[in-house]
Image (tube, coloured by chain):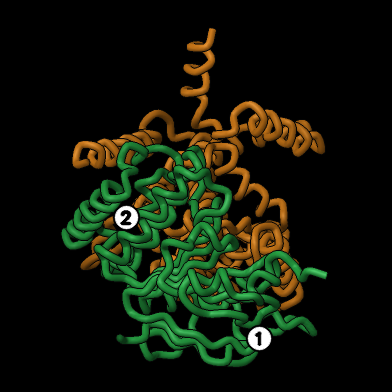
Amino acid sequence: MVEMLEVLGLTKRFGGLVAVNNLTFNVEEEEILGIIGPNGAGKSTLFNLLCGFLRPSKGQIKFMGKTIVNLRPDQIVDQGLAKTFQSNDTLFREMTVQEQVIMGCHLYRKTGIWQRLINTRSYQEEEKVILRRVTEILERFGISTWRDSITSSLPAGTKRALGIATALAANPRMLLLDEPISGMNVNDAEILLETVKAIRERDKRSVLIVEHHMKAIHELCDRVIVLNFGTKIAEGSPQQVVKDEKVIEAYLGVED
Amino acid sequence: MNRLLSAKYLKLLILAFFIIVVPLISSSYHYLHFFIMSMIYGIAGMGWLFTNRSGGFSLGQTGFIAIGSYTSALLTTRLNISFWIALPLAGVTAMLISAMIGVVVLRLRGLYFGIVSFGFAEVIRLVISGTSFLGGGVGIFDIPAPDAIIIAGIKLLEFTGRITLYYLCAFLFLISTYIFWRLDISDWGKTLQAIAQNDKLAESLGIYKMKHKVQSFAVACFFTGIAGSFYAHYLNMITPAMFTIEQSIWIFLCPILGGVRSIVFGPLLGAFVMTIVSNSLRGMGNYEPVILGAMLAVICLYLPGGLISIGTQIAQRLRKM
């Protein structure tokens, strides 16, 4: 197994608060890893560190053997590590569904500003190729009927699907999902989980899911890491982890 | 797709046709002056709108008009350089300065960017007023009209009359319109809108936010500088008092009044209406800004899409009735 993502001794301090404390884990190829934890466990901080929106105070993040801690968010995506945000943050609110997925293909583009200016043949060809790809993606995620709707008018489940479709448009090697099913109804959540499974099965990609609820991703993940107060308190298969005493304690509190 | 594209080109051709026809109707001084000023502000307004596409609300566009017009005026009066060389140099100077400040200032969002850009324009104005080499508070006079185009000893075009100046302005306007329009409808322009709507998501799709912002600002200011250069040679004189916050406000009112959706028609229409209204209010003295302000408020309230949307608005109202 090749390691896609390696996190070594990752620490992030905000003043006196240690949000992520000496965290070490890895994600293997074609693996679905879940990171769960109660409120304030440091999940969002971890997500932002992996995306490049925050710089770690200490530690190393390696993606496919290359360190990414000093890269800008857009450079990290260029390396092949894509992500989706929580609910409404996954949208360009005034664009149509198709326009948004076209934006997702940004990294595909090779033509420069001058070619756009005079509308060269190569630019038009590129537009056609991208449009074809976008059509494919929309069909795959079952949102082609929404093609020309404004993104902010979509139902919640479709918004999430659109978020993932947009992230996959650039054909990343690995996908980070930030609370993909929070606030969703059971039906939508199931569809979404199927989608995530397909990303592994069909595209052979790794997925890292950051979630609040254990139950939701129980079936989906190969391996789960539980965070509390910024440190890893348990790691293993979902079945093992739910039985772990420390985990139960973190979620439910200690019995007197 | 092809049909749609040609329909878009058609719009541009119609605009070009109207602009070319204007002097044939009348060549009176005031009449052409209206159109020339509208086109100058139209270019600056398009530049503002282009900057605004990525979310910046610039209050300092007058600074770049000033940079353009002073560069060009100084080069032609002090160094006797031809207008045809000074014109692009004015644009390039504005572009370089905008890129340099942009790298720092464009990190600020929304109105914060506006405040700093306003400060920048004021600094430019004060520096000019205080430097005697730049003409000081008095300004620069006797700026020559654009040099005649002479090929092989034959004078092809002279820019002494109003009509030739009009066509020169129209030429500059149409070129900048084409470039702004082409960029605006391309995916590159869409990228700017993406940054304005959700910059974190844009970044997470691999868009280098700062690069796009600085590039668009630089392109916008290049043409603003060109407009400034023409402005100086058209009026034959410039003073620092022309480049106050009032002019910045004028520049951003043009696209807002005309409509921000279309980069081609909105700014020009807005500039045209503003020029006419402010000229017909000349006699009102201090009430002029009050009336302009009231007009703007009414348009923002009842025509959020700008004057350009008046047709569709009326159609909608009628359908409801």
Asked which quadrant contains residue B301, the reply is: top right
Q: Residue at x 46, y 60 (%)?
A: B223
Question: From this viewpoint, is residue B95 visible?
Answer: no
Tell me the quadrant of the picture where the N terminus of chain B can be found. Answer: top left
- Name the residue type under label 1: Asn
- Name the residue type under label 2: Leu
Percent x, y of residue B230: 49, 58
Residue B157's disc is 2
Residue B291's disc is none
> Which chain gets the orange colouring?
B
- Determine the secondary structure under disc 1: strand
Choose between B215 and B280: the one closer to the eye: B215
Chain at tag 1: A
Percent x, y of residue A221: 43, 68
> Which chain gets the green colouring?
A
In front: mark 2 or mark 1?
A: 1
Percent x, y of residue A141: 32, 49
Q: Residue furthest top?
A: B321
Question: From this viewpoint, is residue A43 visible?
Answer: yes
Q: Residues within 10 Å of mark 1 (few under 14, many from 20)?
A: many
Choose between B142 and B57: the one closer to the eye: B57
Instruction: In the rendered view, tell whether residue A200 sits above or below residue A229.
Output: above
Q: Residue at x 44, y 73 (%)?
A: A33
Choose between A242 and A47: the one closer to the eye: A242
- Determine the secondary structure under disc 2: strand
Instruction: In the rendered view, tell whether residue B240 sits above or below residue B25.
Output: below
Q: Would you say B144 lies left or right of B285 here? A: left
| Residue with the mark numbered 1 | A21
Q: Would you say B73 lies left or right of B126 here? A: left
Q: Residue at x 43, y 59 (%)?
A: B191
Q: Residue at x 62, y 69 (%)?
A: A37
